[in-house]
Structure formats: structure tokens, C-alpha cells
Image (cartoon, helix red, strand yellow):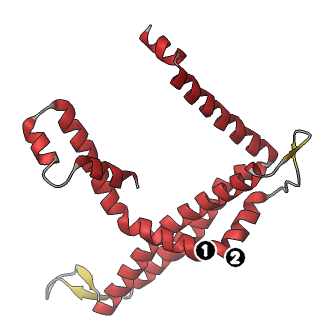
Amino acid sequence: AVAFRLFCSGDAQIAVSKAAGCIEAACECINQDLSLLSEPLIALLIKIVVFTTLFGTIILLATCGAPKRLGPNSVRRHFEFSTELRFYLTYVIFMMCWMEELCRSMSQYVLAWVTERWYFTPYVNDVKLEWHRNAVCKGYVHLFRKHLGTVAIGSLSIMLFRPLRLFLKVYSLFGEHAFESRNPVLVCISTSICCLPCVELSAKL
């Protein structure tokens, strides 16, 4: 009975109406441009090409190490890497993390660009006026021509701050659990670093 009353309330009806409108608009956008269905495949192919190249680079660098015996009469060997080679390996691993965020940001940008172009295209007789097909390919072209630097810098910032975001997210969940359990020790620990609302705000950024 309580759930039914909440569902029939004005706020619940507004939320359900907005959600239904978003789903209807998304389905209409996909129906008018089926190239949106191919975007995950395109993003996957880009990741395969990028990470195959970087992983092959790591293997080639790892094979440049000097094999050394563990002992005078030992058959077992291990690879020793110079400082320069370790720097190269660290750099390639750093680039792999950056490319992961970059590929994800590129996919999100293209989907957002196609959705924005579709949404602001006016209707004429219940049909989108001058709506062109293959918008996903055009979105990638637009990204590489005008916004690749912005997306690269943004993905770099996301990669650098992701450990902090994960820590704040875990800390926020820990604080919520502490206040729900009403354990004074957990509450003191959760509030010892900083204010919980500030942590929750930082975790959502």
C-alpha cells in the first residue's frame, strides 16, 4: 500500500514520465540512425588496434633485458633492465592507462555528439529535417578534426585523478555504513579525515 501511494504521488509520476520520455527519445534516435548500434564495435576495434600495438611494444622492450644467471652453477636466469629500459617500460604502461581512458572518452563524446545533433534537428511532418545517416562516422571525424586535444587532456585528468576518486568513493561508502550502524568507533574514523559531505561531493565529480 505504501509503495502504491508513493508511485501515485506527484514526484514519482514526474520521475517515471521523464524516464519514459528519455527511453522513447533514445529508441527513436537509434531507429532513425542505425549506425549508433555499430559504435560499440567501432570502439572495440580501436581498442584492439591500440592495445595490440602497445602490448607488442612492451613485449619487445621486455626482451631487451640482459639475462643473468641466479648463481654461478645455476641454470635459472632472470632479466636485468637498465634504468633507461625501465623508464621506457613505465612510459608504455602509462600510455596504456591513458589510451584506455582516451578510447572511453572518445566513445562517450561521439555518442553525445550524435545525440545532440539528433535532438536539436527540428521536426517537419514528424520527420527530422536534414538528418544525415552514418552520424557515428561523422562524429569520429568531427572528434579527430576539432576536439582530439580536448578529449586527450580530459582523459589524462580522469586517469590521474581516478585513484583519488576510487578512494573517496570507498571512503564515502564507509562513512555511510558507519552512520547507519551508529557505531561510535566507525563514526569517529569516518569523520577523522574530513567532512563526509565534502567526500561525497568529491566522489561524484
Q: In this view, which residue lies farthest toward the front?
A: 10
Residue at 24% from the left image edge and 49% from the top image edge: 171
Residue 200 left/right relative to 45: left
Three-letter code for the amino acid on which mark 2 is drawn: Arg
Asked whether 130 or 98 is in front, the reply is: 130
Q: Quadrant of residue 93?
A: bottom left
Placement of 64 over or under 127, stated as above or below: below
Q: Are marks 1 and 2 in contact (CB under 8 Å)?
A: yes
Q: Residues within 10 Å of mark 2 (few under 14, many from 20)?
A: few
Query: Split into 4 quadrants, where in the image is the C terminus?
Result: bottom left
Write down the residue under mark 2: 145
Residue 137 location in percent, x, y? 75, 63
Inspect this view and state whether residue 201 appears: yes
Give the numbered dot on residue 148. Answer: 1
Q: Residue at x 41, y 67 (%)?
A: 159
Asked where in the image residue 186 lies, by quadrant, the reply is top left
> Would you say 167 lies left or right of 128 here?
left
Residue 75 at what x, y percent from top left? 22, 81
Amino acid bearing label 1: Leu
Q: Is residue 193 left or right of residue 56?
A: left
Q: Report the residue at 39% width, 51% height from top.
A: 204
